[in-house]
Amino acid sequence: MLEDRTRAASSPTPWPAAYPKGYAVVDVETTGLARDDRIISAAVYRLDGRGEVEDHWYTLVNPERDPGPVWIHGLTSEVLEGAPLFGDIAEEFTDRLRGRVLVAHNAVFDWQMIAREYARARREAPVRQRLCTIALSKELGLPLPNHKLESLAAHFGVVQRRAHHALDDARVLAEAFRPSLRAAAAGGLRLPLHECRPLTEWSDRPLPRQQSGGYGGYRTSSWRPARKRPACPHPNPGRYEEGKRLKQGMRVAFSGDTSVERELLEDRATEAGLHVASSLSRLTSLLVTNDPDSGTSKVVKARQYGTPVVDEAAFGQLLRDVEPAD
């Protein structure tokens, strides 16, 4: 009996078959948070399906512009001057990411920056899914005071040596991700995976920076700078009905990654006379998402309210023939 109990205690936790077979824990340092900002360093820790480290990699990247907040990342123009361009390291980066789920802290930021650099280099990032460790910590119900990386690291007893250094941040995250992944597996938790869509159409036109706020002049809670659009001049005619045309004044919300840069889609919707909404309510006419099965707040609310949902391609077709307002 004692032998049976010992064998049971030493046996590995049953691993969910649906879990990914490998992960790429990524951290990038950048010149700022806007869509015209650039990556200046990148690090990748490759992990196997159970979170064990296989290897790691780090590189500086010449952003071909000023380095931004040196007081945060410590990388000066002199340091970056002789660094490779992103196009020079894209193949190596691809080898590190291919076939793995991208893991990052506030993963939407790292993914969008990476996707944009690949687009500039006329290449496609080999990433199809990402996992945000902030979302995973929420799913696990970890008692964290906030969602900073340092708090997640402290919870698991991981020592952070050089904050805002891509290699050390990636190491810290890899060490904190391993016990998080094991806890999720032990509880049979469905991992909060999100689809990644490489950019096929994008714009690098700079956006005006705010005079105050967080890192890069933008709010620290999101990588996307706030944009104030003019009020829609048309009244809301109600919900979109399948098989019919969109009508000027309809409220449209977006969720998840898009192949055409989000801001470009929103600009086109605005130019067509639609009301671009930042959140979803009972008044929303249509939700545009390529991942209708995701658990984002907008998708969940759309199900609750019965809001019509279409994907990006269908929305693009609808934009070609928007019915004028009455």
Image: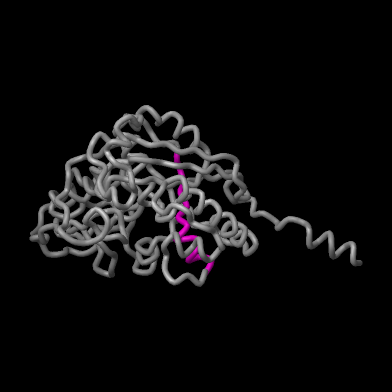
Give residue 103's position: percent from left, percent from top.
48, 49
Q: Is residue 180 magenta?
A: no
Q: Position of residue 2 (x, y in %)?
A: 90, 66
- Image coordinates of residue 212 in percent, x first then y, are 18, 61
Say if 122 sits above or below 253 in the image: above
Q: Is residue 139 magenta?
A: yes
Magenta-colored span:
127-141
Q: Residue at x 21, y 61 (%)?
A: 251
In the rendered image, the quadrant that contains the C terminus is bottom left
Tag count: 0
Q: Residue furthest front?
A: 78
Q: Is residue 17 left or right of residue 106?
A: right
User: 296 above or below 174?
Assistant: below
Across and down, in percent, residue 52 comes to 62, 47
Q: Residue at x 38, y 43 (%)?
A: 197
Q: Residue at x 22, y 61 (%)?
A: 213
For residue 22, which quarter of the picture?
A: top right
Give whichever of 68, 13 is nearer the camera. 68
The answer to which of 133 and 28 lies nearer the viewer is 28
Q: Nearer the viewer, residue 237 or 272?
A: 272
The N terminus appears in which quarter of the rendering? Answer: bottom right
Residue at the far right in the pictured view: 1
Q: State the colouring used for the structure image.
A: one colour
- Going by the image, does 158 lie left or right of 166? right
Residue at x-position 29% and y-position 32%: 81
Indicate left or right for 4 with 296 as reference: right
